[in-house]
Image (cartoon, helix red, strand yellow):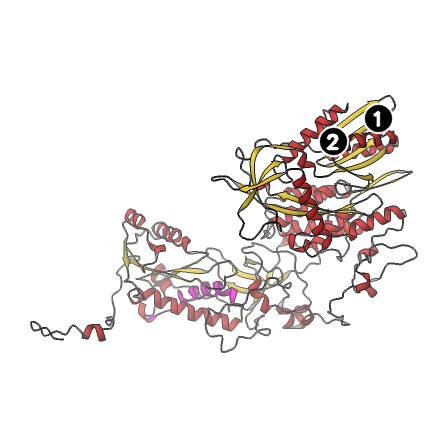
Amino acid sequence: MLHESNKTCSICPLAKQHRLSFPHSITNSAQLFDLIHCDLWGPFSTKSISGSSYFLTIVDDHSRFTWIHLLDNKSQTSTHIQSFLTMVETQFNAKIKSLRSDNGVEFHMSQFYASKGVIHQLSCVETPQQNSTVERKHQYILNVARSLRFQSHLPLPFWGDCVLTAVHLINRIPTPVLHNKSPYETLFHSRPSYSHLKVFGCLCYATTLLRHIYKFDPRAKPCIFLGYPSHIKGYKLYDLHQHTVFVSRNVIFHEAIFPFALKHPISSTDSVLPLPLPLHESVAPFIDPVTSTSSLFQSVPPSPFNSGLLSPPLHSDLAPFLASPSEIIPKPCRRSSRIKHKPGYLHDYHCHIATSSSAPAPSSSTSGIPYTLSSVLSYSHLSPAQKCFSLSVSALTEPTSYTQALQCNEWCEAMDTEIKALELNNTWTVVDLPASKHIIRCKWVYKVKLKSDGTLERYKARLVAKGYNQCKGLDYYDTFSPVAKLTTVRTLLAVAAIKHWHLHQLDVNNAFLHGDLAEEVYMTLPPGFAKTGESKVCRLHKSLYGLKQSSRQWFAKFSSTLLEFGFVQSKADYTLFTRSLPDSFIDILVYVDDIVVASDNSAAVSIFIHMLNDRFQLKDLGQLKYFLGLEIARSELGISVCQRKYALDILETTGLLASKLAKVPMDPNVKFSKDSGQLLADPTSYRRLVGRLLYLTLSRPDISFAVQVLSQFMDKPRAPHLDAATQVLRYIKTSPA
């Protein structure tokens, strides 16, 4: 379609127009930092060993010198650009006049550019050719980085060090663009030194620091050369045994040996850097690939020391490149890796724990475990009744979730019984949730109740409210409620042993339900009892386990009842109640709903239990055998207290039931520091372990000093602290009871 006025066609542009060609640019800035080019590369699917997914590239237009920064996320870009402008002003006494970048939001800092007088030049949308200087630099950097990685056969998580080393080399290579000068020479007006350059990724040995070695320790440790750190006169190395990155100047290089080359050669199909490796949830311990290179290297034991740590342990992306122990150390005989299962007819029995003189403990050769638990734990010295109780405590397991409990009919019946008891006690009313009201959730907690002779008393399913969702001033006010001090527990047991008092244990059924709620609290329906799509909630009238105010309400009601019975509340421990009559003396110790009764008159105890049962529903557990994790055994010689089950549970949780024994809980020659060693990635597990060990010191004073030392590093625990805690556990295994 032609227009008569100018003979132009309006259809041709719509049908055939394409992008215009770009002219060849030959301009170059006259002075340093007149113009800098910036661009961000990433994100890369595989994080580097330092946790980075991006790198920021800055190129000076005049000297073509390149600065590169590894970034964890895009938000760090603006901070690095601002720091770069400050560095140029300080180190080169120059001002950056213009900054050219694409339209990425990470470069939009108009107020900052205006305060510095910098012109921010932007390329057109989807037109990277206008920022071609840094785009071509990216291509150049990745070409060199890939070459370094392919030659050294390093795993992909080392890509960050490949990029940093590539830039270090590119800045020192002469280029025709600068009339055969290097960017380094153009920027600093002096020729660069090449004497320090080494082959990237090669094997090297770093001298061990003097303060970390003993007379017969190795004087060096095998490493991989990873490049040249900024502003440090040393080499960046990766410790093949400790899996850490550090800096050292005392290094001997073997530039023709690449430790990863023999294990996993990179094929011709691995032609680009961005090739993600599969992530693995669990990784086998790292075995030095150098050991397969030469028999000379096999004689060097792993060094337990490192210096100048720069990074956390190597993560799971390196798992496909790790050598297995069987490839390094030949074994004289092969053991089957098949998982051994207990025969079906033994499922109802607790095996390989109790040993006696008539039944010797299974040896390591028969059990396949080098350090069996039965070699250090024996029940032969216990009475038949106490042995039955100890084995029953360990044998019966408790589900940890509602899904596990559904697989057992006994636990399903226990949940039905609990719901009926709650409804009978008028604990709640099912209503619609009022507007603007806060709701809390609930869960099931399961507990096996045993009689004093070790036989099963009942399966107890308890509905617990998730009180941590409560809001102060809205659905609770005061929460404090006293519990028995452990010092009081030990004192009471000591006095009972001296005076030969009777010790009785009681358990209150649904103790918290006896407390009335003054606040308006709404809770979701119990798991397993709510219909699909139903929006009903429970308006609580009685206290429930888990509520912040429940223990306070229960203790107030129970203590007032004891005072009515003529008991006197102790001022030293408010959970201790005493009543002294001419013919009897009774002590009552309360820990939430667990009650210990000590008396010199068993008939008076029976009368008291009958009176208390009229007010509360009680379970008479008989003689005191198990209280707050303490296993209590009594004989004519006195009372013995241990935490055998608690100790075995810790060993089982940490996976150290089959660990090697330790003779002492802590090496007296080791000095711990808050700054030396690798920081733990997850300090929560260390804090939980030390907390459990602190409770174990109730019956184990031999570990008190070691545990108190470890508790000083709860804020920022490090690898040496965790190793010391592991030694304490191996020492506990020598005598769990």
| Residue that appears at 54% across and 45% down | 536
Q: Which residues are magenta?
A: 154-175
Q: Which residue is mark 2?
A: 615
186 to 713, vertically: above or below: below
Q: Would residue 665 be counted in the magenta stretch?
A: no
Foreground mark, 1 or 2, reads: 2
The answer to which quarter of the image holds residue 27 is bottom left
User: Considering depth in this image, is 336 or 701 the residue closer to the camera?
Assistant: 336
| Residue that appears at 32% across and 51% down | 109
The answer to which quarter of the image holds residue 164 is bottom left
| Residue that appears at 82% across and 58% down | 351
| Residue that appears at 52% across and 77% down | 267
Residue type at tag 2 = Arg
Report whether residue 691 is seen: no
Q: Which residue is mark 1?
A: 585
444 to 180, vertically: above or below: above
